[in-house]
Image: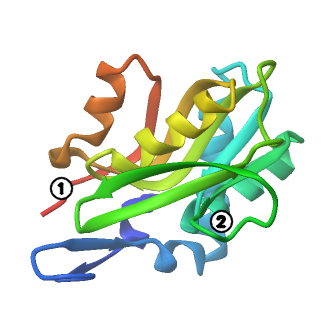
């Protein structure tokens, strides 16, 4: 199964000049979604981790299924003001603006090695912020797994240069 066949490309969304890679067409097909989860699970086996974290919101779709299959705790990295207890926060830049993500202070500790899963990596700003959240929580980032890598935007390379392990299921140009 070629998972690329299930990714819809939408030009000029969310703003002009962005070519949005839409995963809703992938997750609405039960076979493509199952294959995606199976591939993430298989790639995760090369890493040693105690928890899975995902970035709001599309990362939750994939990470929660992987967490269930692997029987690993799932940590949500959420947008600002979405978590009710005490949080660590990291501000970061997106390719089309700025944002903040947060994690509950009691979600990750010094014994944890965390696999971070997200739907897509572009410039790497969100992924770097996720890594900072894990690290300020005293955890270790074991690796990242992304469904889509927008290879010409350099996010995966940025993470690799920062000594993070990175896996991608699919590569697409970002423009």
Q: Which residue is mark 1?
A: 173
Identify the residue at image location x=30%, y=55%: 93
Q: Secondary structure at mark 1?
A: loop
Q: Residue at x 65, y 21 (%)?
A: 47
Residue 12 horizontal side relative to residue 28, left or right: left
Task: Provide the secondary structure element on which disc 2 rests.
Answer: helix
x and y percentages locating residue 87 in the rendered image: 70, 51
At x 75% / y 57%, what residue is drawn? 64
In depth, the one of 86 and 134 nearer the eye is 86
121 horizontally vs 24: left or right: left
Vertical order, 155 against 21 (above or below): above
- Give x and y (percent) for residue 76: 70, 55
Task: Tell me if mark 2 has few (under 14), some (14-19) or many (20+) residues whose alpha carbon lies within 10 angstroms of its own.
Answer: some
Q: Is residue 75 above or below residue 24?
A: above
Please name whichever residue, 136 or 57, is drawn nearer the observer in this view of the structure: 136
Q: Alpha-carbon distance for marks 2 and 1?
A: 23 Å
Give the residue at mark 2.
Answer: 61
Residue nearest the viewer, comparing 131 with 99: 99
Where is residue 82 drawn, in percent x and y?
67, 71
Residue projecting furthest to the right: 71
The part of the image, by quadrant, that contains residue 57 is: bottom right
Query: What is the count of numbered marks?
Result: 2
Mark 2 vs 1, N-terminal side: 2
Residue at horizontal 42%, vertical 39%?
A: 128
86 sits left or right of 101 in the view = right
């Amino acid at each position: 199964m070629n998972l690329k066949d299930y990714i819809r490309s939408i030009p000029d969304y969310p703003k002009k000049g962005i070519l949005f890679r839409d995963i809703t067409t992938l997750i609405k097909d039960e076979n493509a979604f199952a294959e995606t989860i199976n591939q993430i699970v298989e790639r995760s086996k090369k890493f040693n981790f105690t928890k899975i974290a995902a970035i709001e919101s599309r990362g939750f779709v994939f990470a929660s299924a992987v967490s269930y299959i692997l029987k690993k705790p799932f940590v949500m990295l959420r947008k600002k003001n979405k978590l009710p207890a005490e949080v660590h926060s990291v501000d970061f830049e997106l390719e089309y603006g700025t944002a903040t993500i947060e994690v509950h202070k009691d979600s990750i500790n010094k014994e944890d090695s965390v696999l971070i899963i997200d739907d897509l990596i572009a410039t790497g700003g969100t992924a770097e912020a996720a890594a900072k959240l894990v690290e300020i929580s005293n955890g270790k980032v074991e690796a990242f797994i992304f469904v889509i890598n927008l290879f010409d935007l350099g996010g995966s390379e940025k993470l690799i240069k920062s000594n993070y392990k990175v896996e991608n299921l699919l590569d697409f140009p970002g423009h």
